[in-house]
Amino acid sequence: MRKIILIIGLVVLLGQSVAFAHWMPREEMYVGGVGAGCTLGYVKSVYGEPKEKWWFNSDGVRGVTYKYSDTFSVTGRTGNQDSRAEDDLMVVGFSLKDSSLATPSGLTVGIPYETVAGMFGRVEKSTIGGRILYSYPAPKSPIELTFYVDGKGIITEIYEGTEF
């Protein structure tokens, strides 16, 4: 009993709350069945040919972003010395800005961030370029699923990306 009182007293004395690192299972980091680890060929088998393609080749990487609409795009990439075909490029991320697709557990644009926090725990809020976001890493992976929210805490974009 004495140790419990001492630990609680220490936390209060320091004025700090206990924070826990939260993560999201890799299998949850897909929308509409696509996400990092799929090939662009698979994406096309699910959604067809994209409306537009944006190619890039710089900083040691080459790839393409498939734009399916103004609110949904998927990016595949590899090292710039890798000669694999477009369909064989691995998906490294996506951006979803509407509620047309959802994660396997039903998370989508338009719901409160509190729903995500209730399922996977609360992560630290960040602000980049004036936008509020919450990012969940996948265990043992460079992949993160990020939820952008508006001032009322409603998800406005779901973004998946990697450091590579």
Image (cartoon, rainbow, N blue to C red):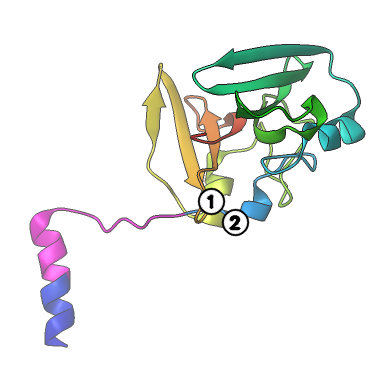
| Quadrant assignment for the N terminus | bottom left
Q: CA distance from mark 1 to mark 2?
A: 6 Å
Residue 117 location in percent, x, y?
51, 50
Packing grade of label 1 (10 A; few <14, some 14-19, many >=20) is some
Residue 62 location in percent, x, y?
62, 21
At horizontal 14% and vertical 53% (from top left) the residue drawn is 15
Give the number of the disc on residue 96.
none
Q: Residue furthest left?
A: 13
Q: Residue furthest bottom?
A: 1
Q: Is residue 104 above or below residue 62?
A: below
In the image, residue 18 lies in the stretch drawn in magenta? yes
Callout 1 touching callout 2 (CB < 8 Å): yes
At horizontal 68% and vertical 54% (from top left) the residue drawn is 27
Secondary structure under tag 1 reads loop
Residue 99's image quarter?
top right
At horizontal 87% and vertical 30% (from top left) the residue drawn is 44
Q: Is residue 14 above or below residue 64?
A: below
From the viewer's side, name the closer residue of 129 and 49: 49
Packing grade of label 2 (10 A; few <14, some 14-19, many >=20) is few
Q: Mark 2 sits on what residue?
A: 25
Amino acid type, callout 1: Ala
Residue 64's image quarter?
top right
Q: Is residue 54 above or below residue 89?
A: above
Q: Mark 1 sits on what residue?
A: 138
Magenta range is 8-22
Amino acid type, callout 2: Pro
Secondary structure under tag 2 reads loop
From the viewer's side, name the closer residue of 24 and 114: 24
At horizontal 44% and vertical 50% (from top left) the residue drawn is 122
Quick check: 12 left or right of 164? Answer: left
Quick check: 95 left or right of 138? Answer: right
Residue 16 location in percent, x, y?
18, 53
